[in-house]
Amino acid sequence: MIDGVRVKKLKVIPDERGRLMEIFRADDELFEKFGQVYATTTYSGVVKAWHKHEKQADNMACVMGMVKVVLCDARPKSPTFNEINEFFMGVHAPILIHIPSGIWHGWKCVSQEEALVVNAPTEMYDYKHPDEQRLAPHNGGIKYDWERRDG
């Protein structure tokens, strides 16, 4: 596992009315601080990658559909520099992923339906000076193949 990345299994509590899933709490071991909460959707087969932050840590969960999340450690002094991690998260794998700053990250929607990802980053989005760097998903310099692997 990439140094500093942490995963929390989420508990889904169903009853005759529906389901409840607690995602992130201020008393969680993963909690650093609160910046904002947002939700983003991804259509089936679409890749949203690569993103990296200098200050911000992300705390992401997929609450509808399924995504394959991929991380690449871009911190030269990290013991896991250039290491890649893959996670599947969503309705069939309810987890929260804590992604520290300095980690390239992105995901691909692997479900037939649109995926809904909720993020609680440690920083508010700065519209004038965004803490976000981007690379192209398929030829941006990270050697990762987003294609499905059958077999």
Image (cartoon, rainbow, N blue to C red):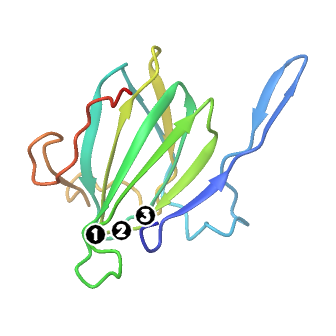
Residue that sits furthest to the bottom in the current view: 77
Task: Kindly identify the residue that appears in the image at 47 percent across and 73 percent down.
Answer: 4
Pointers 2 and 1 in contact (C-beta within 8 Å): yes
Amino acid at circle 3:
Ala
Lateral position of residue 103 relative to residue 21, left or right: left
Task: Kindly identify the residue that appears in the image at 28 percent across and 36 percent down.
Answer: 48
Q: Callout 2: few (<14), some (14-19), or many (20+) C-alpha neighbours within 10 Å?
A: many
136 to 73, vertically: above or below: above
Lateral position of residue 145 relative to residue 67, left or right: left
As drawn, the label of residue 54 is 1
Marks 3 and 2, how far apart at CA: 5 Å
149 to 85, vertically: above or below: above
Residue 56: % across, % down: 38, 65
As drawn, the label of residue 135 is none
As drawn, the label of residue 57 is 3
Marks 3 and 1, how far apart at CA: 9 Å
**For the residue labelled by badge 1, is the local secondary structure a helix, a strand or a loop?**
loop
Pointers 3 and 2 in contact (C-beta within 8 Å): yes
Residue 71: % across, % down: 35, 55
- Which residue is tagged 2? 101
Name which of mark 2 and mark 1 comes first in the sequence.
1
